[in-house]
Amino acid sequence: MTRMEALALLTGRAPPVLGPGHVWLVGAGPGDPGMLTLDALAALAQAELLLHDALIDPRILALAPDTAERLVMGKRGGRPSARQDDITQRLIAEAQAGRRVVRLKGGDPYVFGRGAEEVFALAEAGIPWRVIPGLTAGLAGLAAAGIPATLRGVNQAVTLATAHAAEGAEDALDWPALAKSGQPIVLYMALRRLPAVTAALLAGGLPGGTPAAAVAEATTPRQQVLEATLDTIAARVEAAGWTVPAVIAIGGIVTARRQLG
């Protein structure tokens, strides 16, 4: 039985077909291969070229055929990285050459992954495309650490925010307004700017004792969790010397980890 036949048996339908000259943007989830969707597995099984983010688990990359070409096209904050224009142009050129292309992104392509920008460019170039959603670390990563994104009696909303402004742009987020919302905040790409962000939230009136947690390499065997408070989380993370991707949760939902972690 082929992998595609096995997926058809599991889902009760024929898996989607990645045609020649098509590009699929696939969410690889927060880290562990077990977080992949069945449609993501179908995409990997058909890939001829895999353009993937820098930190995709090697076990996920191994799910593509041995004959598939694998190219790292990740963007790492503060480190040498592929330029977004280069990534987009490579996607278009490879599709125009008739290859079955999978653009494999950590988390979900449309959650702080610049997936929409790539789709806009593909559509403008007339390239057939599809997006395979993935679990985003800001939700799945917290769950793996025992932190629910919503908790009855604690919050009625949750804010997903990036601490990394667009290239050449100033930080446009109104952090004091987020502080005044009284709802939990989940931060992506926040390690480098965590002192500035926490200071802005404190200045906005969020109490320094507000529970906070940092989750690194969520869902993987290397997962680490630091619990602290708003006024200590930046120092705790700095002392830990983390250089790996992490999500930061700020708010009452963090206290649930005492029972769920």
Image (cartoon, grey):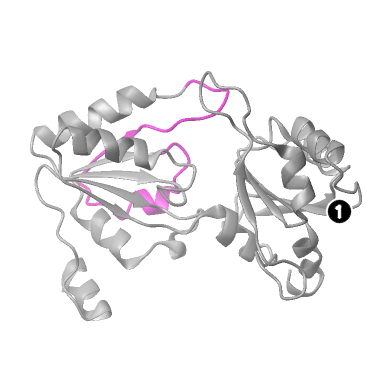
Identify the element where label 1 is drawn.
loop
The image position of residue 248, as x and y in percent, is 69, 48
Front one among 72 and 255: 255
Residue 63 part of the magenta segment: yes
Q: Hey, which quadrant is residue 21 in on the image?
A: top left
Tell me the crowding category of disc 1: few under 14, some 14 to 19, or many 20 or more residues within 10 angstroms, Cα based: some
Residue 152 part of the magenta segment: no
In the rendered image, the vertical position of residue 186 relative to residue 96, given as above or below: below
Identify the residue at horizontal 44%, vertical 45% (top origin): 56
Identify the residue at horizontal 22%, vertical 57% (top origin): 45
| The C terminus lies in quadrant | bottom right
| The N terminus lies in quadrant | bottom left
The image position of residue 192, as x and y in percent, is 68, 30
The image position of residue 228, as x and y in percent, is 85, 51
Identify the residue at horizontal 20%, vertical 49% (top origin): 47
In the rendered structure, the answer to whether residue 252 lies left or right of residue 246 reads right
Q: Hey, which quadrant is residue 3 in on the image?
A: bottom left
In the image, the segment drawn in magenta is 53-80
Total label count? 1
Most common secondary structure along the magenta stretch: loop
Front one among 37 and 169: 169
In the rendered image, the vertical position of residue 77 relative to residue 66, given as above or below: above
- Amino acid type assigned to the residue bearing label 1 in the image: Thr
Q: Which residue is mark 1?
A: 210
The image position of residue 173, as x and y in percent, is 64, 35
In the rendered structure, the answer to whether residue 194 lies left or right of residue 88 reads right
In the rendered image, the vertical position of residue 184 relative to residue 25, given as above or below: below
